[in-house]
Amino acid sequence: MDGRDNFHPSRDRRFTRAVYGGTTGNLSVLRDLVATYRPEASPYKVYFGEIHGHSELSDGRGSPDDYFATARDEAKLDFCALTDHDHGGVRAAELWDAGKWELVQQKVAEYHEHGRFVTMLGYERDSWPYYPNACLYYREGSGEMVRGQEDGEITHTELAELLRRDDILTIPHQISQLEVGVNFRALPMELMPRLVEIYSKWGTSEYFDNPKPIRTAVRGNYWRDALERGARVGCIAGSDIHSPFPGLVRDDGDDNLRQPNPGTAAVLATELSRDAIFEALVARRCYACEGARIRMDFRLSGAFMGSEICDEGSPERCIWFEVEAPDAIENIIVIKNGRDQFAWNVGGSAAKHRGVVVDLVAERDCDYYYLRTTMVDGRRAWSSPVWVERGR
């Protein structure tokens, strides 16, 4: 037999024959075989940004100028959004009063520079009883705030309509918090967002009992709970800082923010433009970083993170990744259907690693896979999943 009746490339019969075939240049042959698993070159570049922070317009410190200038000049981010609260904070005017929203749009336009520094228009909307809060991001640099029947609340119909809009992207945060989190076990499927914020300076909302949880927690409110429900939800990170230090490790002066590392959003986009960044987020071609700007390319059968594909009846699913971190990597894990399935225990030996594995087991009508990278200093990154429907 000449086929690849195997569970892992190292068990591919072609590898065995290359070693035992009695030919010279076995190492070269092995390298050529490994190359057959490598997908085509990516058409995308990785861009990093901070998309969740506050200024003195609501309950933060510093001006919008301080915020955007720091993101651009000190943190050297590629893109950035200021997301002040719609309610303005305790004893502060609402964002729609006193010309605040107009000022935000003015600063978004002023600091935006195509190809160098992309600014996105956004704000944080109270969305009780479905989400604790949700950050809204606009495709354009201008637009009206989304208000409903009752300020601070949102109805089923209003939220469903908001999630269907193609000019605004809605991303809930603090999803796992006990007091005001998102109960994904009960949330109607039509109210599931395309993305959730799984890491901020509050902590991590990947799964219950994760190493860096939010201060209070409840089962059922985690990203993985939504995935286990069958929701097609990707992930992103944002700091939720209340000081003018987006993208930097600085003291925020807020005791509730437990983690020192910022929440950094990463997107795979064709160019550094507002349209391309927004399109990547909508496509879930994005991932979450705990401060460290880790470059990740994660593909399944050639499909990029965020994709929904069908295995067309073939059991062979080739999982490929390439990770480059700013410092040594501890491990890289492929999570399948809510559990750690494949592991590369790098152990601090390298800051760049590439791996491939062939999975032949279709467990559900739709399986999901995502990648988690952990550096030796504990900082992590999570890819959005790839969903694979079983062919008939």
Image (tube, rainbow, N blue to C red):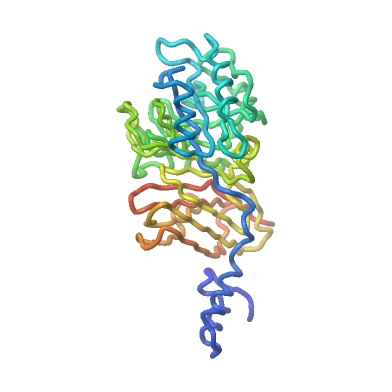
| Left or right of 31 in this view: 222 | left
| Left or right of 53 in this view: 158 | right
Q: Residue at x 51, y 18 (%)?
A: 86
Q: Is residue 379 visible?
A: yes
Q: Quadrant of the C terminus?
A: bottom right
* Vertical arrangement, residue 329 with respect to residue 99, above or below: below
Residue 112 coordinates in the image, percent (x, y): 58, 30
Foreground of the two, 329 or 152: 329
* Vertical arrangement, residue 129 with respect to residue 79, above or below: above
Q: Residue at x 49, y 12 (%)?
A: 94
The quarter of the displayed image where residue 38 is located:
bottom right
Foreground of the two, 6 or 291: 291
The quarter of the displayed image where residue 36 is located:
bottom right
Residue 322 coordinates in the image, percent (x, y): 51, 58
Foreground of the two, 312 or 143: 143
Total marks in image: 0
Residue 365 coordinates in the image, percent (x, y): 61, 52
Residue farthest toward the bottom in the current orientation of the protein: 22
Q: Residue at x 31, y 26 (%)?
A: 253
Residue farthest toward the front in the current orientation of the protein: 73
Residue 288 coordinates in the image, percent (x, y): 48, 43
Q: Residue at x 62, y 48 (%)?
A: 307
Q: Quadrant of the N terminus?
A: bottom right
Q: Is residue 182 visible?
A: no
